[in-house]
Amino acid sequence: MADDHLPIVETHKSTRSLRWCSEADTDAFARALAAAPQLRDAFIALHGDLGAGKTTFVRHLLRALGIAGRIKSPTYAVVEPHEAPDGLQIFHFDFYRFADPREWDDAGFRDIFAGPGLKLAEWPDNAAGRTPVADLAIKIEAMTDDTRSVTLIANTPRGSDLLARIAA
């Protein structure tokens, strides 16, 4: 029977929990992540409620990668492209308002995710089935004491390398 021998799928999930007590902690984490060479072609999914700090984290990460000037939230544009001084292409997605799957193809998102560069996606569940598996998922939760509980989940070998690098 064909179902007797299901394929074994190797998983690379590993997790780490952090607490960001201030925006300085967010910035320090972003700088550590920016220093990791594995970040260059990574896909990072950002999870959390409205106001949890996803966009704030992205702004710190983009600054750490050398992006100057105003960093806009892509809530209405869906994607904001950036180029770091070293030539790294960065795509910041916000799928909060994403509702039409045709938009995925029409906007060329398939090509962006298939190509080189760092991809950061807020509200990735709204584009489920279209995005690849995130190398690293970051879940940010605002706590009642104004700190942030952060869970990092590595889903791929690249994600595991990133997690090891920032844990060092």
Image (spheres, helix red, strand yellow):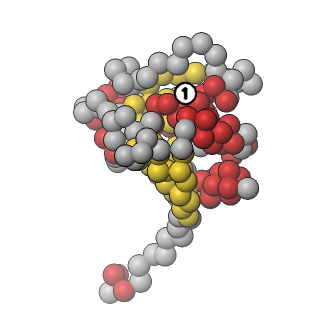
State the quadrant of the N terminus.
bottom left
Whether residue 72 is visible, yes or no, is yes
Q: Is residue 159 above or below residue 122?
A: below
Characterize the local packing of mark 1: few (<14), some (14-19) or many (20 or more) Cα atoms within 10 angstroms: many
State left or right for residue 5 relative to residue 64.
left
Residue 76 point in image, percent of width and height: 34, 20
At x 37% / y 39%, what residue is drawn? 123
At x 52% / y 19%, what residue is drawn? 71
Q: Residue furthest left?
A: 99
Whether residue 130 is visible, yes or no, is no
Please tell me in which quadrant of the rendered image residue 40 appears. Answer: top right
Residue 97 point in image, percent of width and height: 28, 29
Residue 86 point in image, percent of width and height: 74, 25
Q: Is residue 123 above or below residue 135?
A: above
State the quadrant of the C terminus.
bottom right
Please tell me in which quadrant of the rendered image residue 14 appears. Answer: bottom right
At x 41% / y 79%, what residue is drawn? 6
Instruction: Tell me the kind of residue under disc 1.
Output: Arg
Residue 87 point in image, percent of width and height: 70, 24
In this figure, what is the number of numbered marks? Answer: 1
Q: Residue furthest front?
A: 145
- Per the image, label 1 sits on a secondary structure element best described as helix
User: Where is mark 1, residue-wise?
Assistant: 59
At x 33% / y 81%, what residue is drawn? 3
Q: Residue furthest top?
A: 69
